[in-house]
Structure formats: C-alpha cells, structure tokens
Amino acid sequence: MPQIDTDLFAGLEGHRDEGRPALVTVADASDPAAWAAQHQEALYRIVASQGAVLVRGLGLTDAAGAAAVLKVLGRDLMSEREAFAPRWTYDDRIYSSSKWPPNQPMCMHHELSYAVEFPATMVFACLSAPTAGGATALADAGRVLQQLPSDLVERFEREGWLLTRSYNEDIGVPWSEAFGTTDRSEVERYCAANDISFEWRGEELRTSQRRPAVLRHPADGQRLWFNQIAFLNQWTMAPEVREYLVDVYGPEGLPFNTSFGDGGEVTEDVVALINKVYDSVTVAEPWRPGDVMLVDNLRTAHSRLPYDGAREVLVAMANPTTRSV
C-alpha cells in the first residue's frame, strides 16, 4: 500500500495500490483537529484525483475528538433527511453509521442519491474496528457506468429510476424520524418542495420519487452512475426477509423498492448484474481504530461489508449539492 509522506503529499496527485484506496499515514498528530485543518486542502486534492483517501494514524480515541476532525474536514455539514435506516446522533450533524444487520452487506450506494439535496463529500471516522469484516468498501462510479450494458444505461438515462417507500412504526424508519418532524403538514411541504409524491394511509406514509440514474460531476463533467437502484431494491434483501415482508405487508408495503422511471420492474437479474459490476471495481481496506476517510460521494459509491465484533464508525455528510427539480 502506498505511504504518502504527509510533509510532501500536498504536491502530489495521490495514488493507490490495486484493490485499496489511497492512504495517508500520519506519523505524529498530537492535535488531530489541527492536523486536519492544516492538511484539509491537500486531502481534498487527493480525493479529487482518486475519489477517496484513507487517513491512518490520527489516534482518535473518543467521539468528541472524532467529531472535531469530521467537522474540520467536512467543511459544510448537512443534516440528514429521508433516511432509510436508523442512526443515532453524536453531535450536531455527526451521526453513527446506519444501523444494519451485521451479518448482511450494505450494498454499494451514493448517500442520499434519491434526494434533491445530497452530500458531495462523505467523511467517516472509526473508533472501534470489528474483529472481522466491516470495511467501508468503495467503487468508482465512472467505471461502473462504463461496464454496465449500454441498453440498460440508455433506458435508465431516458426514464430515470423510481423509489417507492412505505413508512410505518414496524419496519424501516418511521416517517417522523426520516423527516425530522411529527407534523404531517411539514412533511407534505417537504415532499412538495422536493418533488416527492405522497399518500397517507392512516398512520402510514407512502411516497414515490423519480430521479436521474446518471449525472455529470460538476468539477470535470464526467458521467457517473449515481443512484441506489440496486441497494434499495427488493431483490437485494435477504430472501427470508423479503418473503416475510411481502407476506405481512404485501408487495406494495415494502419499506423501499426501486423500479424503472416508468414503473417497470427492476428484476432480480438486473439487480444481480449491477451488483456484479460494482463487485468488479470494488476496493477496500479494513478499518483500524482512529482511521478517517474522505469520499467524493458523486465519484465514488460506498458499501459496508458484513462483520463480526463491535464496530463504531462516525459519519458526516458534507458540502451539500442541490439538483434542480
């Protein structure tokens, strides 16, 4: 794995070994937040070149210290709306990683790619690394787009993709948590402002939103596969989970599902194909306690591998970007 000299890396474009993200090893950082402030611009240059960078050796040992570093590196943090899995809050706009069964993978996705406002940058900090697995893996969205079948890409570019959600108190995230309010009128105003169709069914909220599947990076215009079509699709669920949810709530009552923009089904074989392409370009490095990682959320998808043992990773969503509606 390449070791990038922290005294010299400001003049480098950054590089990485095959199969691993770019790595910066810190020899001495008695004040991690001050180190982050001093090297912030250089780290962002590596992210612009490589899509992500892992910083190792900052010696973070507690949530307060990690939050301070995330706030410095994030520059402009944003609050999460429309969450699809629970988190807890450590500090203002500093969250835990999504609560997801540790024995199940959290598939490749771009954070909030279904929202009108999404983070351009993700910043992660590891306080406790699992005994096995649990890496935050990465995939180059430009390479994914190039390797997907052209006819599939053309259809998604033509139609976009549709996300449907059912919010209730039993499964997934309740609407009050996802939208940060218990006031239905506020939820309705948010939906109207963010091009989300909604329907109330008693206490249950059902929504749908159509989004582009491909976007261009604002820095260089590169076309990128940017969505959560495979991750939030019913066929990515563990078979026993999907069967149970369909049996109890019906196919229309799943907590989330995706389709083509015209409502056509995204079939199991399409989901498998997308995930296979992701797998072919995935890079990963196991977390160590104290690690920090910056990720270009447009250029780079991320996932979470299954794991054993305790895993504590803090997350900040940064540098909000708004798409037109």
Image (spheres, rainbow, N blue to C red):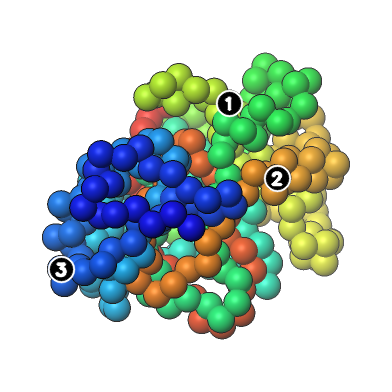
Q: Are marks 3 and 2 in contact (CB under 8 Å)?
A: no
Identify the disc placed on residue 157: none
In percent of the image, x 68 and y 67: which residue is there?
104
Q: Is residue 88 above or below residue 4?
A: below
Query: Vertically, is 136 above or below 90?
Result: above
Q: Residue at x 47, y 36 (%)?
A: 298
The image position of residue 39, as x and y in percent, is: 21, 50
Looking at the image, tell me whether mark 1 or mark 2 is earlier in sequence order: 1
Please provide percent x and percent y for residue 246. Answer: 81, 57
Query: How many residues crowd mark 1 within 10 Å: few (<14), some (14–19), many (20+)?
Result: many
Residue that mark 2 sits on: 280
The residue drawn where x is 58% and y is 49% is: 18
Say few, some or many: other residues with alpha carbon within 10 Å of mark 2 (under 14 / 14 to 19 / 20 or more): few
Q: Which of the 4 image quarters holds residue 100?
A: bottom right
**Marking on residue 214:** 1
In the rendered view, tell whether residue 198 sits above or below residue 124: above
- Would you call the spot at circle 3 few (<14 residues within 10 Å), some (14-19), or many (20 or more)? few
Q: Which mark is residue 31?
A: 3
Q: CA distance from mark 1 to mark 3?
A: 40 Å
Residue 278: quadrant of the picture: top right
Residue 131 makes an appearance in the image: yes
Task: In this rendered view, identify the residue nearer to me: 80 or 203.
Answer: 80
How far apart are the two marked residues, 1 and 2, measured between alpha carbons?
19 Å
Task: Give the foreground label among 1 and 2.
Answer: 2
Q: Amino acid at mark 2?
A: Ser
Q: Amino acid at mark 1?
A: Val
Decide if residue 4 is on the left or right side of residue 157: left
Location of residue 171 (image quadrant): bottom right
Disc 3 marks which amino acid?
A: Asp
Q: Quadrant of the C terminus?
A: top left
Q: Earlier in the sequence, mark 3 or mark 2?
A: 3
Mark 1 element type: strand
